[in-house]
Image: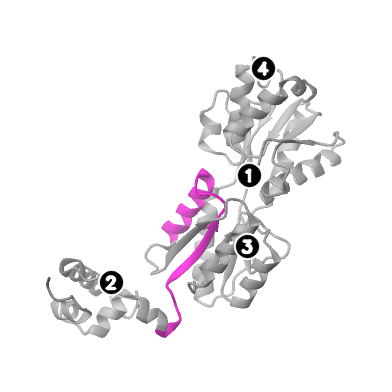
Amino acid sequence: MGARITMRDVAEAVGVSPMTVSRAFREDRAVSVETRNRIRQAADRLGYVYDSSATAFRTQKSGFVAVTLPSLNNANFAETYRGLSNAIEGSGMQLLLGATNYRVEKEEDLVRQLLARNPEALVMTGGHHTEATRDLVAARGIPVIEMWDLPDAPLGHAVGFSNADAMGRVVGHLATKGCRQLAFVGTTDGTDSRGSERLRGARITAERLGLPVIRCLDAGPAPVSMRHGAELVERLAGELAAYDALICVSDPVAFGVLSACRRLGMAVPGDIALTGFGAFEVSAVSDPRITTVSVEARRIGEEVARLLDALFAGEAVPQQVEVETKLVPGETT
């Protein structure tokens, strides 16, 4: 076994000092891009791997941002993560990701574990947390960004949109189509805070427009899936004639509902109208195309990255950054 390659070996190979090598790996702008590239190429050729633990101990900076997502399988959350990841590339920061599975209690445990690793910032999905989580975050004093929501009392900063307002536009659209009896397909156990906000917004708009109160049809625990939507239709098929339209918490749920309706011989929108949420790819390729709401998932991640960059630079930033949503009419309404 050969001798262990050190930072001094890399420095000698490039013709610079070990301090310059250290600065290059820490993305110090005092080292030119050309020199940094030469150092990294030499390190790769020699098989040298930079150990950041000593620097982290000395500077109390870990070089990573902690991120929590409700699910790793949701295409929209994946797009948000991709937007964030791509936008911070080259900044010297890395992302440490954890999934809460839509449970605030699991989020609390996850945040406690992430904070123990000394992140330089924390990015959380949604604005609904346990009191213990809020206390943990407040005590740490690092930049915090909540995304996919605009909470009334943010922990730090927020990048997102009003789920209630976005779903209110769906109800307004259905009303223009002559739909009065509406039902919401989602979960009733309170675990999906964004879904709860969408139901609240739908009900507020229905009341404003003089429509009957919107009933929530429980499709199962969060995350509600295509299968849950299909099973709900099969279970309640005899009751669906009472509704003019079904407002689904997400596009995957709407696709499951649509598929089951077609199997049962129900015409959409002839017998019942249908809407989703999120502008997932499935809404555009389904037959018929599903009426939905675009939430610009990737841009949420990009805006989070911009906010982080400004916060790390000590710049003044707005407490909330609102991302536009828009109704995308399809063929199911």
Q: Nearer the viewer, mark 2 or mark 3?
A: 3
Q: Marks 1/4: CA distance? A: 26 Å
- Is residue 94 in sight in this rendering? yes
Q: In the rendered structure, find residue 222 and report the number of the disc placed on it.
A: 1
Can you give x and y, in whole percent of width and height, for residue 274 in the image?
A: 67, 28
Query: Which callout, 2 or 3, points at the residue further toward the start of the chain?
Result: 2
Q: Nearer the viewer, mark 1 or mark 4?
A: 1
Is residue 252 left or right of 195 when viewed as pictured?
A: left
Q: Nearer the viewer, mark 2 or mark 1?
A: 1
- Colour setting: one colour
Is residue 178 left or right of 194 when viewed as pictured?
A: right
Can you give x and y, in whole percent of width and height, for residue 151 in the image?
A: 70, 60
Quarter holding residue 199 = top right
Relative to 50, residue 183 above or below: above
Q: What segment is highlighted magenta in the picture?
A: 58-87
Amino acid at dot 2: Val
Amino acid at dot 3: Ala
Amino acid at dot 4: Met
Q: Which residue is under mark 2?
A: 33
